Image (tube, rainbow, N blue to C red):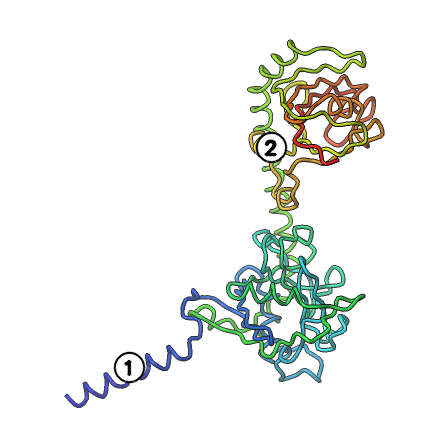
Amino acid sequence: MKNKVLQLFFLVALMTTTACNDKYPDLEDGLYAEFVTNKGTMVAKLYYDKVPVTVANFVALAEGTHPMVKEEYKGKKYYNGTTFHRVIDQFMIQGGDPTATGTGDPGYKFEDEFNPDLKHDKPGILSMANSGPATNGSQFFITEVPTPNLNNRHAVFGELVLGLEIQDSISNVETSKPGDKPKEDVVIQELNIIRKGSAAKKFDAPKVYMEELPKIKDKQKALREEAKKKAEEERLAKEAKNAEAGTAFKATLDEYNTKATTLPSGLKMYVITEGTGEKPNTGDMAKVNYEGYFADGRLFDSNVKEVSERHGMFNEMRDQQGGYEPMPMKVSPDANMIPGFKEGVAALKVGDRAYFYLPYHLAYGERAMGPIPAKSDLIFIIEMVEITK
C-alpha cells in the first residue's frame, strides 16, 4: 500500500513538473522559436523538415552551438539582447544583427534554401534577410502583410503561430529616416527554442547544418527542375481549361457581335446591361471591370476574379496585390490604353456593361504584345463601375 502511495505521489509530481515546464501546451509537436521582446512574446513554428539547413542555422545561433560563428560569438546565445533594427509598417520587422546596423553577420554566409511549399503569402512569415543570392547569415524578418514579390529571393523557414498582434505593435513603432530604425529599441530579450515531440527533440542543429549544407546546391537544383516540370504541367492544364471555357463562351460572344453597332472608327459596340448612372466627362477618372478575349473566346486578361477562374487564368499573386479590383483609368484620348479600349470606355455611363469588338488596328496593330499575336482582333466586355473624378 505504501509503495502504491509513493508511486502515485511521484506520478503526480512528474505530471505537475511537466505541465509547469510546458509553457505552450496547445502547440502541436514541432520545433518552435520563442521571441521574448520588450513589446511582448511571439512564437514561430520552424519548418525543419522542409528547409533543414536554414532552420539548423537559426536554431544553432539561438542556442549558442553554431560551429561556424566568429570567435566572439562562440558559446553565446547569438540573438539574446539583439534588436529589431529595421521596421517598416505594412511590410516587415527585421532583426538578427548584433551590431544593429543591418551589416552585421555571424562570420559566414550560406546558400539560399527555397521550398515551393513555403511562400511569403500571409502575415507572420519568418524569412531570411540577405543582400543577394547566397548571402544568408543571421538576419531575418517577419512579415506584416503578404509579400509574394519576395518568393524565391528570401528563404522562408517559419511562421508565427502566437503573437501576431505583437508583430503588428512592433511594426507601428516610430522610426527614424533614413534607415527605418526604431527611435526606441525593440529588444529581443531572449530567443528560446522549444522542442515538442520526439522528432523535434532529436533535431541536432549543428550536426544537421554541417551535414546538409554541402547537399544544398544539388537539392535546390532538383527542386527547381521539379518546379519547372510542375509549372509546365500547370501551364498546359490552364491552356486546356481556357480553350474549353472559350469554346463554351464563343456562342455568347457571337450573339453579342450580331447585335453590335459598328461605329465610324470600326469599333463594334453592344450594351449588354444598361446602367442608370452618369456618363464621365473627358478628363474624369473612372473605375472599370474588363474581360479581354481572343476572337475564338479564349481569355487573355481580366480583372474580374470569377472570369479568370472560369478560364483557368486566376493568379494568386495578382489577387494578393489587389489585381482583381476595378481598374482606375483616365477617360481621355490621351490615356495610356489601346485606341478601341479608350473609345469604348468613353461611350459608357456608370452601370453599363458592354461588348466591344476591336479590329486589330484599334488594338495592338501589327505588333505582338505578350500573349497577343500581331494583327489580332480582340474582344472586350467592359463595365463602368464608378466615376471618381
C-alpha span from label 2 to label 1: 60 Å
Q: Is residue 288 above or below residue 212?
A: above
Q: Is residue 84 above or below residue 334?
A: below
Q: Amino acid at mark 1?
A: Val
Towards the viewer: 170 or 366 = 170
Instruction: Examine the image and state in which quarter residue 359 appears.
Output: top right
Structural crowding at the residue carrying mark 1, measured as other residues with C-alpha within 10 Å and reported as few (<14), some (14–19) or many (≥20) = few
- Per the image, the residue denoted by label 2 is 308
State the quadrant of the N terminus. bottom left
**Residue 202 percent location from the top left of the image:** 47, 72
**Residue 165 percent location from the top left of the image:** 56, 64
Disc number at residue 287?
Answer: none
Instruction: Examine the image and state in which quarter residue 89 appears.
Output: bottom right
Q: Amino acid at mark 2?
A: Ser
State the quadrant of the C terminus. top right
- Per the image, the residue denoted by label 1 is 12
Residue depicted at x 50% and y 68%: 31
The local secondary structure at tag 1 comes to: helix
Q: Is residue 280 left or right of residue 170?
A: right
